[in-house]
């Protein structure tokens, strides 16, 4: 793989990998460092990457595994509100306390979902991966992924409605979701 091929085929993945790495590492600086280190590792393995039949799956899996390795090395830290809301593409200073609370509750519900539901909803709705990319990462068929995602969204909606059950119309919960 030449330098130009690497720039054209591999470097564009950094845009898609950043949200996934940020969700796992929960720190902007660490995410940038991890992404840079990951690109260096991919450059060193460019021959393996050239021979790989599924480059996308290889790159995404390598990024995910690398971020989990980094996470194991550091102590668990509590996520502060500012990082949580950047994840939802909103600046922390633009959000009211009420909106922050809503997002916190939704994240808490997502974090308590069964693993396959949680993984699929995070990869699709938070990280923005396509069904094809999620299929490569998880091994589930696309039809199965759609069912899992639908059920995960339904569970999140039900749990959020329980939290905000004082609104019997469900309008408040739909506004959050």
Image (cartoon, rainbow, N blue to C red):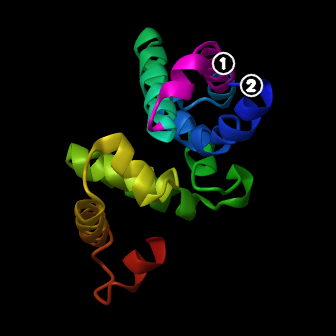
* Count of numbered badges drawn on the protein: 2
The answer to which image quadrant residue 138 occupies is top left
Magenta-highlighted residues: 34-54
SS at mark 2 in the image: loop
Whether 36 is among the magenta residues is: yes
- Quote the CA–CA distance across marks 1 and 2: 10 Å
What predominant SS class does the magenta segment belong to? helix
Q: Is residue 37 magenta?
A: yes
Of 132 and 161, the residue lying toward us: 132
Q: Is residue 172 left or right of residue 56?
A: left
Q: Which residue, given by chain and number where applicable, does mark 1 sit on?
A: 43
Q: Does residue 46 appear in the picture of this structure?
A: yes
- Looking at the image, residue 122 sits to the left or right of residue 9; the answer is left
Looking at this view, name the residue that lies furthest to the top: 73
Pointer 1 with pointer 2, Cβ within 8 A:
no
Residue 31 percent across, percent down from the top left: 62, 28
Q: Position of residue 167 (x, y in %)?
A: 33, 83
* Residue 108 visible in the current orientation: no
| Whole-percent x, y for residue 24 in the image | 47, 33
Residue drawn at x 62%, y 38% as measured from the top left: 18
Determine the residue located farthest toward the bottom in the rendered image: 169
Quadrant for the N terminus in the image:
top right
Q: Which mark is residue 20?
A: none
Instruction: Return the residue at label 2.
Output: 2
């Amino acid at each position: 793989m030449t330098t130009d091929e690497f720039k054209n085929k591999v470097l564009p993945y950094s845009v898609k990998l950043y949200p996934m790495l940020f969700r796992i590492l929960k720190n902007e600086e660490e995410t940038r460092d991890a992404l840079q280190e990951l690109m260096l590792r991919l450059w060193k393995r460019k021959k393996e990457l050239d021979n790989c039949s599924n480059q996308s799956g290889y790159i995404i899996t390598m990024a995910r595994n690398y971020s989990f390795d980094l996470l194991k090395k550091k102590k668990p830290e509590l996520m502060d509100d500012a990082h949580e809301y950047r994840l939802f593409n909103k600046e922390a200073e633009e959000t009211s306390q009420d909106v922050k609370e809503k997002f916190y509750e939704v994240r808490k519900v997502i974090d308590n979902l069964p693993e396959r539901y949680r993984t699929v909803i995070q990869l699709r709705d938070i990280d923005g991966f396509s069904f094809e990319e999620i299929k490569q990462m998880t091994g589930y068929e696309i039809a199965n992924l759609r069912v899992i995602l639908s059920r995960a969204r339904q569970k999140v909606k039900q749990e959020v409605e329980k939290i905000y059950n004082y609104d019997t119309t469900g309008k408040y919960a739909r506004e959050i979701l």
